[in-house]
Amino acid sequence: MHVGHNDNTRYHLQQDGKKWELKSVTEERDLGVTITSDLKVSRQCLNAVSKANQVLGMVSRQFYNLDKTSFLILYKVFIRPHLEYAIQAWSPYLKKDIEYLEKVQRRATKLVKGIGSMSYAKRLDLLKLTTP
C-alpha cells in the first residue's frame, strides 16, 4: 500500500536474481482493522456497522419481547463488541462515521419491550447505555 502524495506505485523486489513487481493495493486488513491508503477510518466503520447489523438482525429474529435485562445482556455480548473492536486504533472522528455507529444502537434499543416509541435519548438513559 502506498501512503503519501507521490505517485510512485511501481516497486520491484529482487530475490535470488529474479525481479518481482509488487502489487499496489488501496486497502489492507490486519487484525480485523481495515487500513486504507488515505488513512481514513470510514471503511473500518462501515465494516463494523455491517457486522453489527447482521448480528442485530439475527437477535431480533430469535428473541421477541425483550425486557431490559435480557436486551442488555444480548446487546453487550453480541452486538456492542462489533462496534467497539479495536476502536482505540481506528477511533472514528468523522461525523458520518459516528452517525453510522449510532444508527445501529438506535435500532437496537427499539427492540426493548415498552420503550420502542420513546426518544433515543430517553432509551439510552433508561438502559444506562452510552454512545459507541
Image: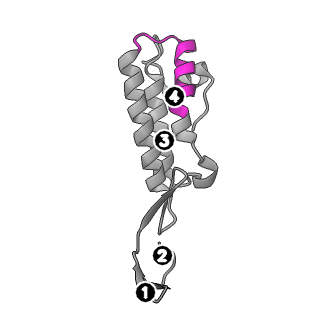
- Seen as rendered, the residue at the extreme left is 61
User: Which one is closest to the eye, mark 1 or mark 4?
Assistant: 1
Disc marking residue 18: 1
Residue at horizontal 41%, vertical 68%? 26
Q: Hey, what amino acid is under mark 4? A: Phe
Q: Are marks 4 and 2 in contact (CB under 8 Å)?
A: no
Q: Which mark is residue 101?
A: 3
At numbered mark 1, what does the secondary structure look like: helix, strand or loop?
strand
Q: Nearer the viewer, mark 2 or mark 3?
A: 2
Mark 2 is surrounded, within 10 Å at the Cα level, by few (under 14), some (14 to 19) or many (20 or more) other residues, namely: some
Q: Nearer the viewer, residue 28 or 57?
A: 28
Q: Which mark is residue 2?
A: 2
- Which element is circle 3 on? helix
Local SS, label 2? loop
Number of the front mark, 2 or 1: 1
Q: Amino acid at mark 1?
A: Lys
N-term-proximal mark, 1 vs 3: 1
Cα–Cα span, label 1 and label 3: 47 Å
